[in-house]
Image (spheres, rainbow, N blue to C red):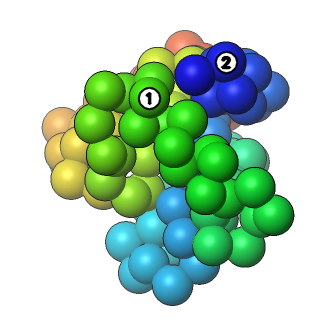
Amino acid sequence: MEAVKRLTAEKPVVIFGTSTCCMCHTIKTLISSFGANPMVYELDQVPNGQQLERALVAALGQRPSFPAVFIDQELVGGANEVMSLHVKGALVPLLKKAKAIWI
């Protein structure tokens, strides 16, 4: 649980996913398209990926859907939640509030 708190505090936007997940790629691309530079942890590529996944389960109380997107240290959710925010016009203001983007 501490690992998740520490990692999500490093940048305004942190994404946990896997390198083979098409929705992870889509969400990374969407967030980056606004000028944000998310910290991305691809759990199948990092040496401690399984430990990070267990820490996410402990922190969230359930197995996360991937991508697991944190903005301003808060879990926003997975692809559906991020896309829903985008469609509602709420994603950019959230990124601005977190100081992930300025314009």
For label 2, the crowd category at 10 Å Cα-Cα, with few meaning under 14, some 14 to 19 and many 20 or more, is few
The label shown at residue 41 is none
Residue 63 point in image, percent of width and height: 31, 46
Observer-nearest of 80 and 88: 80
Please state which amino acid type lies under the numbered disc 1.
Answer: Ala
User: From the viewer's perspective, is 89 left or right of 32?
Assistant: left
Residue at image location 31% in from the left, 53% down from the top:
65
Quarter assignment of residue 50: bottom right
Quadrant of the image containing the C terminus = top right
Residue 91 point in image, percent of width and height: 38, 35
Residue at image location 62% in from the left, 46% down from the top:
52
Residue 66 point in image, percent of width and height: 39, 58
Observer-nearest of 62 and 39: 62
Quadrant of the image containing the N terminus = top right
In the picture of the structure, the residue carrying the numbered disc 1 is 58
In the picture of the structure, the residue carrying the numbered disc 2 is 2
Q: Is residue 103 above or below residue 59?
A: below
User: From the viewer's perspective, is 52 left or right of 31?
Assistant: right
Q: Is residue 53 above or below residue 70?
A: below
Residue at image location 21% in from the left, 53% down from the top:
80
Going from N to C along the chain, the mark reached first, 2 or 1, is 2
SS at mark 2 in the image: helix
User: From the viewer's perspective, is 77 left or right of 88?
Assistant: right
Please state which amino acid type lies under the numbered disc 2.
Answer: Glu
The answer to whether one can see residue 85 in this image is yes
Residue 101 point in image, percent of width and height: 67, 33
Observer-nearest of 27 and 56: 56
The number of callouts visible is 2
SS at mark 1 in the image: helix
User: From the viewer's perspective, is 52 left or right of 65?
Assistant: right
